[in-house]
Amino acid sequence: MLVTAEANGRNRRQAFIAAVLVAWAAGLLVWIFPPLWLLLGLSPYSYWWVRRRCLRRMAVMQQPFPDQWEQILRAQVAFFEALDDAGKARFRQLVQIFLDEVRITGIRTEVDETVRLLVAASAAIPIFGFHDWEYHRLREVLIYPDAFDDAYQSHGGSDESILGMVGLHHLSGVMILSKPALLAGFAHQSGQQNVGVHEFAHLVEKETSEYGLPPEVPWPVVRQWMRYVARELARPSKHGAHISAYAYTNEHEFFAVLAEYFFTSPELLKRRDPVLYAMLRDMFHQDTGSLLHLMPRRRQGIGRNVPCPCGSGKKYKHCCLARAGATEPTPAA
């Protein structure tokens, strides 16, 4: 996602090769049929077409980071606050590019800068340790005012219990997140649930299955993980007390739930299952236990007694916080 000097040079070479090939093909056609000489103009256009995303990202990365965004990240994203100066600079650029390329739309609810920043942070956290990463399949994130059902409907019905989902069919390339659950995931850094990280972990798994593993992830660790998951899912009635029963729904949910633990409660996970923690550390190429270990325990995010951001008029602790805390993250379709 980020444009390094190496990536920029590689993209420039690809654009040059594309321009040369188009010029050669156009020249051949002109030699056969001279009136087609206008096709030679496709050569510089092909160069620009290959370079356009790289150039746009470079421009976005050079833009100043808004003060309001900085305040939101520092106040609500413990992962960002724990980074050193170089890490913070890289995280800001990941957020800038994500918000420039992925549309975030509110469905019957307001999407303010806090919601936008928390969605972008959810996307940046799982892939922060990868040198070069793309969310190829994601075009838009829909923010719902509450939980929703399998038909993507949210009207307050008793069967609406899904807090996050990666869409299928006509919603392919779309992620849906419950606004209260998203806010609650960053409001309690000592908890183990973060629906944003959960759903983007699903996307990380899908991306690696389609486009290959990042070079930072060693194959022996992947094989060890696959054996571990197969062994755990084979005995769902005996799962560890420190792992949510929801993780045992299938191998995809096991990965996403454990990713939540790894990025929200790494010290607890490391203490209770150091082998599992080590596998996740090597897969995500991050040591969150060491990163977040020195962070002071302080209340972050939305205060329990402030009006709920959903607009109900109730206090946050009696409205969306209670509802989000009572429901576990649910599967990506």
Image: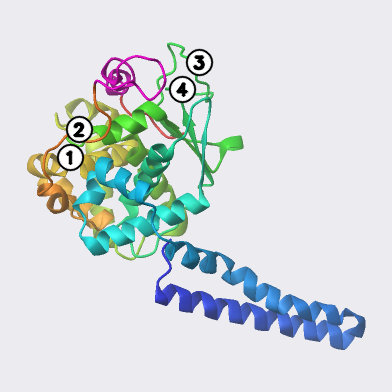
Residue placed under numbered mark 2 in the picture: 191
Q: Determine which of the numbered discs, if any, sits on residue 265 in the image.
A: 1
Q: Is residue 302 magenta?
A: no
Measuring 27% from the left and 58% from the top, which residue is drawn there?
88
| Three-letter amino acid code at the position of disc 2 | Gly
User: Element at badge 4?
Assistant: loop
Whether residue 48 is visible: yes
Q: CA distance from mark 3 to mark 2?
A: 28 Å
Secondary structure category for the residue under label 1: loop
Q: How dense is the environment of label 2, judged by Cα within 10 Å: few (below 14), some, or many (20 and up)? A: some
**Left or right side of 121 for 190:** left
Name the residue carrying label 4.
148
Q: Who comes first in sequence, dot 3 or dot 2?
A: 3
Separation of marks 1 and 2 at Cα, in angstroms: 7 Å
The spot of residue 120 in percent (x, y) is: 40, 46
Which residue reaches farthest front?
67
Viewer-side label of 4, 3: 3
Residue 157, percent across and down?
46, 12
**Which stretch is magenta?**
305-327
Farthest-out residue, top: 158
Q: Residues within 10 Å of mark 4 (few under 14, many from 20)?
A: many
Please report contact status of discs 1 and 2: CB closer than 8 Å, yes or no.
yes
Q: CA distance from mark 3 to mark 1?
A: 33 Å
| Nearer-N-terminus badge (4/3) | 4
Q: Amino acid at mark 3?
A: His
Scheme by which the image is coloured: rainbow
According to the picture, the residue beneath numbered tag 3 turns out to be 155
Is 159 drawn above or below residue 263 in the view shown? Answer: above
Q: Secondary structure at mark 3?
A: loop
Q: Is residue 318 magenta?
A: yes
